[in-house]
Image (spheres, helix red, strand yellow):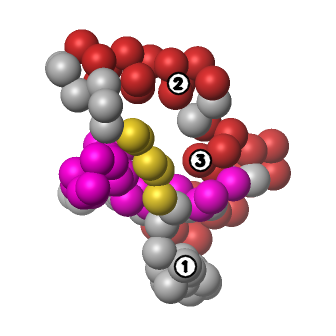
Amino acid sequence: MSESTWTIENGQVLVQTPMTKTLIGLLFNAEAEKIAKEALRTHNTGMLKLTLLPGDAAVKKAKKARPARTGSVQAKAMDHPLVQQAQSLFHAEIRNVTDLRKND
C-alpha cells in the first residue's frame, strides 16, 4: 500500500496499487476492509468509499536474467549447492551477487 498512489475523487478514496486484481482479492479480505473503514471513520471521512485499483496491465514483465560469465562471482554463487537447494525449495531467483572476498 505504501507504493500505491492515493487520490480522492467523487466521494471515493482511489488507491492505484501495483498489485494484480487477483492479489488484491486475496490480500484485501473482510478483516482488512473493516480496518480500512474504521480508519476512515476515525479521520472523519467515513462517507468516503475506499476503492483499490489493480496495477497497470501494461507493466513490463521482468527481464530474463542473462547467464553468468564463467568464473564470475555470480557463476560461483549459482553453482553453490546451498543456493541451488534454496532455488528449488523456494522457487527463488538470484538478483544480486555481492563479492565479499578480500582482494589481496
- Disc 1 marks which amino acid? Ala
Image quarter (top left, top right, bottom left or bottom right) of the C terminus: bottom left
Mark with earlier residue (1, 3): 3
* Residue 34 versus residue 27 in the image, above or below: above
For the residue pair 53 and 60, the one nearer the viewer reads as 53
- Relative side of 89 to 25, left or right: right
Name the spot of residue 84 as percent of width and height, x first. Answer: 74, 53
- Identify which residue is drawn at 57% across, 35% down: 28
- Disc 2 marks which amino acid? Ala
Mark with earlier residue (2, 1): 2
- Is 11 contained in the magenta span? yes
Disc 1 marks which residue? Answer: 57
Label 2 to label 3, Cα distance in Å? Answer: 11 Å
* Residue 3 versus residue 61 in the image, above or below: above
- Disc 3 marks which amino acid? Ile
- Identify which residue is drawn at 69% across, 54% down: 22
For the residue pair 28 and 34, the one nearer the viewer reads as 34
- Is 3 contained in the magenta span? yes
- Secondary structure at numbered mark 3: helix
Q: Quadrant of residue 49 in the image? A: top left
- Relative side of 8 to 100, left or right: left
User: Which label is found at residue 24?
Assistant: 3
Disc 2 marks which residue? Answer: 32
Q: Which residues are magenta?
A: 1-22
